[in-house]
Structures are given as structure tokens and as C-alpha cells.
Image (cartoon, rainbow, N blue to C red):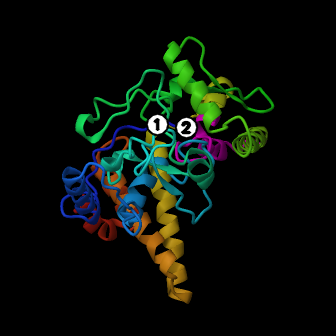
Amino acid sequence: MRKLRRSSLQLPTLAGSGKGARAAADDATKKQADSSARLSFKGREHWREPDVIGALHSRHGHVCAYCGCGLADKEKGDVEHFRPKGKVTNAPEHGGYWWLAFSFRNYLVSCWHCNQVIKGNHFPLRPRGKRRTASNWSWGNEDVRWLLHPEDDVEQWMVIDWRDPLCEIQPRDGIPVTARQQVVWTRDFFRLNEEPAIGSRVRTKERVDEALKTERFSEVQTAACRYQPHSLFVRQMLSEVRPELIPDEEFELKWMIKQTANKLKRLAIQLSRNGLSKAEKALAKEYLWTLAALWKEPPVGASSDVEALLGEFGLKSRVQPLFDRL
């Protein structure tokens, strides 16, 4: 799990007159007329639109926010509602956090296993915690939860023991008691010290060890990039053995833009040869939205820096119309 900064992106689908924004307004009207009304989200999965997926990947890369495992090259991952939208397991009277169903801030990229096999509609609260409703909700008045969120101080609270053959996750010594409890609770809930997560971390360590031994240092540096699987683990390992190889945010940003540009280039070549499937056309749109989101809200530096990089890759004119909509 890597720490994420809070986003202020206003995505076309979820803001203004976008489909998601309209759906959220419709839901609010229904609930105002009848607080017990049941909402269905079937056919209204607007969080799967290219601008939403692309913006999420600009923050996470193609990596699960929970277990840190990488997604397949053309796999989008699930758009995970951190607070369940329709219902909450073990709290049938609540009815879910329906007012956050179309909120970008409630979304994370997740692998299928973490989202559908493990988390589902679970959202456990700490003892004596009161579950918020639409009437008393605000981002500054949130539930007292057990699960860690990437906007928490996760990189300071979690330690992956790279000397341990199993590379297990543990809470860092000296952190507050509540933070320690949340790390342990989240680790055990998502089975982060079990397969498949633990096997994926071990394989990452083996690759990094081999790259260090053979002095393939650029490969090591790339493995520690925030958009890569288990990059927090790699960074913590390098901090003890080769701290000079830890990439800075500028390196990470350039790497992400280059990787996304290369994916678009491969799709363009395929288009010229055999055409693109519907799924591949959607991928191209998502890649362009990823670049637009990085341009609008760069993790480091100024938007003009990203603009210059897009110009170098010959992509500025393609991304500009999307950037103008953010």
C-alpha cells in the first residue's frame, strides 16, 4: 500500500452534468422522498467510464491499492468503493454509503481477489464507532474505521521485513497504538501475509536481489517506482542496502508518462495493422485520460513540466482536449 495525496480532480463523468453526477442527484431525490428506498446500481456503473479509470491509474498505476500486486498489462482492475455503496455486511440497517457511489474520492483500484473475494461489502468500524449516514456525513466527520486507506500515513506505519524469507508485513515500532491496531487489522483482513500477496512480494524480492547482484541498477530503480507492484517494500529494502537507488517523485512521474505513452504507441501500431477491438479502443481512451490527469494534477512539479513531456512524446495535441475538460 502506497500513500496517496488527496485529489481535487473534477472528472466530466462525476461532476457538473456528467452521467455520474446526474445519477447521484437522482439518488438523493429518491432518498429524500423515501429514506427507505432501495437503490440499484445495475446499469449505472459510471465509475467504469474512461475518465474515471484513467484518473485512478494516474494515482495508483496498474497496482492493487490493498495487496500491492500488479494487474495484468491490459487489465483495468476493479473500481473499489472503499465505503460500500449499496449495503454494509453486518449492518443491514445502514443501507450502504449510497451518497458516495459516484464520488471519486471513494474509489480505489483493486485486484479482483481483494475486492470481490475478500472485501465485498465489509466496512468494519472500531469499537463504539458510529456509522455515518447521509444526514451527518462529511469528509471531516468520517466513520471511526478499522481499515487503512492510502490517504492515511501508511508508508510510515507499515514495514515489510525484507530479511524474512516470507517478507511479512508488520506495524512499525513506535507508532501510535491505534495506528498499530489498524495495520494489524488491515493486514489480517486482506490476508496480506498469505497467498497470493506474500508469494508476489517474495518473487519481487528475488527479482530485485538478482538485479542488484548483476548491477542492473536501472531495473532496481524502476522496481521502486510508486506505480510498480510492491514498490513500498522495494523502497524499504533499498533504504538499507542502496538508498541512492530510491527514485524521487520526478523520476516516478516521467516513468509513468513514458510507460503510458509507449502503451498508446503500441495500440497505434496495432490500429494501423489490424485495427482495434472495442476493449482496446477503451484502453486507448483510458491511457489518454491518465495523461490528462497527470497534467492537471501532477504529483510533483508543475503542470507545465508534464505539458513539456507530452510534447516530447508527441501527445500534447491528443491529451489537450481532455485536459481542458478537467
**Residue sticking out furthest to the right:** 165
The span picked out in magenta is 214-234
Rendered position, 225 above or below 263: above
At label 1, the amino acid type is: Pro
Along the viewing direction, whichever of 247 and 296 lies nearer the viewer: 296
Q: Is residue 15 left or right of residue 284?
A: left
Residue 203 on image: x %, y %: 76, 44
Q: Name the residue under label 1.
A: 150
Q: Which image quarter holds the C terminus? A: bottom left
Residue 62 on image: x %, y %: 54, 54
Residue 297 visible somewhere in the drawing? no
Looking at the rendering, which quadrant does residue 244 occupy?
top right
Q: Tell me whether circle 2 and circle 1 mark residues in contact (CB < 8 Å).
A: yes
Q: Earlier in the sequence, mark 2 or mark 1?
A: 2
Q: Which mark is residue 207?
A: none
- Identified at 28% across, 50% down, the residue is 9
Label 2: element kind: loop
Rendered position, 301 above or below 33: above
